[in-house]
Amino acid sequence: MQSFRAIREGGYVYVDKTEIVHRLVDTGKYYFLSRPRRFGKSLLVDTIEELFKGSKELFEGLWIEDPWDWSQTNPVIHFNFAEIPYRQLGLEEALEIELERNAGFAGVSLETNSLQGKFRELIEKVDGAAGNVVILIDEYDKPLIDFLNDPKELEANRLVMKTFYSVLKGQDAHIRFLLLTGVSRFAKVSLFSDLNHLEDITLGRQFNELVGITQRELERDFAPEIADMQQEQSDILATIRQWYNGYSWSGQGETLYNPFSLLNLMKSREFRNFWFETGTPAFFADMIQRNPRLKFPDGEVESGPEVLIDLFNRKTAYSGPDDIRPVTILFQTGYLTVKGYDIQRRTYTLDYPNLEVRESMQVFLLEAYTHLETEAVRPTVLDIGDAFQANDIPQVMKHIDALFVNIPSTLWAGARENFFHAIIQTAFGLLDILMESGRNYAGTRPDITVFTKTHIYVLEFKRVGTVEEALAQDLSRTGFGILTKDYFRPFQLDKRRKVAIGIKFDVDKKAVAEYRVQELD
């Protein structure tokens, strides 16, 4: 639910964020906040609107009830771009209708004809006293995000937005508070260059907990549900944390839960992937399928702040989603989160926040790579896991081969070994067994290492050459290989059986051409 009033009047659970909201409105004036979808941005905006309107009855019993001055109210101009029909009418016409709608709520009429003039007139007429107007703009970037696959329409919308937001630069005398939310920062909209006072609070510790749910809030506000689940599983809090906690935008302090996933868990009492279907932009899969060589992190990755926040490269014209850095998309959609910050280097360390998101990414990538339907991905992967546990390598190879059946021939034609590697690595990552990919072990770097209770498997892939070369990894050239036991040397004291598997792919047939298995003594 995104309506603060509906939550409070309906007796629903509200996680009290009003202390940090008070700090936000009391210490600054112009803000921009970026967070992934389904994180509570719209509820935050709605809460702030009710606060400035003086709806004291809705805040009874909350932290802010006593310190807030309820004798002061402010007119609010509120735009929610998720509700504006720009796709049907065009962005400029849709914005003009929204301006008239806000004017109607405020009891004023607009006489100016231009979009820029209407917005300026609305602010000035609504302002009953100097510096009185509160402007809230939710999902400001949606008219751009929705057209990432259409650079021409995106550029047209960018020019409209540039004109629209440029009005704010000269309205300082009329504005009491301004908040924009979105998932990306588009520097070329001019908002971030023209409005010099706009403070980007996306990264950093001060407002890290403004949206999302902390561990303390979880245990306080969902105590009855947790107590109920503890009757069946005593360590339920640890499981909840493993599945759904781990988000941070500072790398310091408390980590957070995604409210959408947590609320669905409390309702269903089942540990499932709730967030994936609502959190992933449609263009992402298309981008991967067009360019299967894209490199996606499998573990920690380091990045600068501009890469995380700015969706586009400032120096080049946008020509399509392929121009966007994968790490930027992954961060802004919530697949990656901040795990640490190096103040000297001004760089952030990123990783998947939790089990739900890691699994979401693996399912998503495997579906995009293999062109399999979502419902077919998991059964195929589970069959691979069962075959490994049974040490049935021929069956493992059959299911690996099935992963490649639906991939278009155009992708296979130019594919390199890392393409096959990425598919298998992603599939194995979904297994309920330990798998490591491309990790250095005492100077060796096997493609994939799989660990079961009874065996350690090392897999090597070849697109060209022979399966023997995959097993030996060019022994004559490199001086080491699987069969010289170098790849297994780090595990020489491990009592599990060691098995080397060399795999060669047939590009023409889109299949596993042959494989060779050898168990070490």
Image (tube, rainbow, N blue to C red):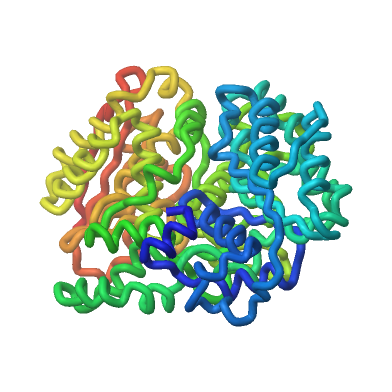
Q: Is residue 129 left or right of residue 3?
A: right
Q: Residue drawn 73% across and 35% down?
A: 161
Q: Residue drawn 68% across and 62% down?
A: 201
Q: How many marks?
A: 0
Q: Residue drawn 31% across and 74% down?
A: 238
The answer to which quarter of the image holds residue 220 is: bottom left
Q: Is residue 105 above or below residue 10?
A: above
- Image coordinates of residue 86 in percent, x first then y, are 60, 28
Q: Residue drawn 19% across and 41% down?
A: 379
Q: Is residue 420 above or below residue 481?
A: above
Quarter of the C terminus within the rendering: bottom left
Does any portion of residue 521 appear in the rendered image?
yes
Residue placed most toward the observer, 405 or 149:
149
Does any portion of residue 436 appear in the rendered image?
no
Which residue is farthest front?
Answer: 107
Residue placed most toward the observer, 297 or 97:
97
Residue placed most toward the observer, 477 or 236:
236
Q: Is residue 56 left or right of residue 505?
A: right
- Image coordinates of residue 118 in percent, x first then y, are 79, 35
Residue placed most toward the observer, 191 or 187:
191
Q: Is residue 18 left or right of residue 344?
A: left
Quarter of the N terminus within the rendering: bottom left
Q: Is residue 268 left or right of residue 33?
A: left
- Image coordinates of residue 3 in percent, x first then y, are 48, 54
- Image coordinates of residue 303 in percent, x first then y, are 63, 56
